[in-house]
Image (cartoon, helix red, strand yellow):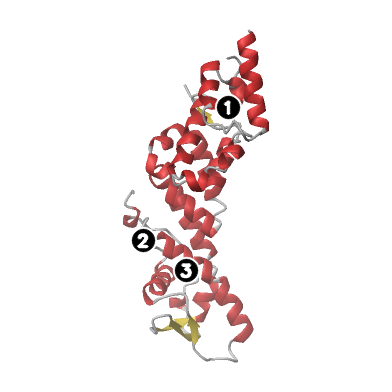
Amino acid sequence: MLVARDEFQSGCCCTEYHQDSIPLDLSASSQNNQNAQTCEIVVSDDAKFNVDCHALSRHSGYFRWLFKESYPNNRSPITLDNINRTEFQRILDYINTGSIDLDMVNIENVLQTCQYLLLTQLTGYCEQFLLTKLDTHWLQILGLTGEFCLLLVGPALLDFLMKNFESISKDVDRFNRIPFEVLFSLAQSPQLKVPSEFFLFKQIVKWINYDFEARADYFDHFMTVVRLPVMSRDELEEVAMHFNPCVYTPALHMLHFLLNNSQQT
């Protein structure tokens, strides 16, 4: 049975999402605006678009600010160096139709465009999509969350990892690619669901051994949060095998104390 670590007693996220559409209120669509003001957009691969300024400014904080500052006085083409023809067309289709096809292949490009153009509402829809993929794409979503600061996904992903730590540790390839900061955050959380503290310790050791040369120094950091007093003597003896006896640390001192105390009893 899995329990949260604070309950231990001492005593030796592809569903074919592209088939679905995301609804959007287009009651003020530029298509109904007979006097729409247009501008020319030039993207990174030199493709040109003649686009309704009002539609862009309603959805994009970037264009809202740009048009407020420079239009209608400045009518020169607007260059978007970081967006190509395909991605900009995808955004225009979203603005014009109120739907967008999302999958785990295109989601990063969509988020990059959202970040560049400040597409707040579309970013929210991307986050809702990612929440449905935590169980199958959690490592990819972990990377996207860090890269794009996804405030909705972040807490949900952390909760998922804490509740499913045992199962994700069995996915050895992906588990071994978890960043140190994330694994350490999980290891120090009292809400982490694991069969035992010794189980947590073994997963940490496996993670370190995956790239021992680069990760060996993390061992002492992890040992500040692994709860040695809840382990049995046999478990403590196995833990001791991973310490460098020549380097003093508070965790090593605690380990010696626990082993000596269990010998006496």
143 to 247, vertically: above or below: below
- Residue at left 53%, top 21%? 237
> From mark 3 to mark 2, how far is it between C-alphas?
14 Å
> Which is nearer the N-term, disc 3 or disc 1?
1
Q: Nearer the viewer, mark 1 or mark 2?
A: 1
> Which is nearer the N-term, disc 1 or disc 2?
1
- Residue at left 59%, top 80%? 66
- Give the image location of residue 116, x and y in percent: 52, 70
Residue at mark 1: 5
- Give the image location of residue 62, x and y in percent: 56, 74
81 to 124, vertically: above or below: below
Q: Quadrant of residue 170?
A: top left
Give 167 or 86, whichever is nearer the viewer. Answer: 167
Q: Which quadrant is the C terminus positioned in?
A: top right
Give 146 or 57, whichever is nearer the viewer. Answer: 146
Amino acid of disc 1: Arg
- Give the image location of residue 102, x and y in percent: 38, 58
50 to 228, vertically: above or below: below
261 to 26, vertically: above or below: above
Give 14 or 33, whichever is nearer the viewer. Answer: 14
Residue at mark 3: 113
Give 247 or 159, whichever is nearer the viewer. Answer: 247
Residue at mark 2: 101
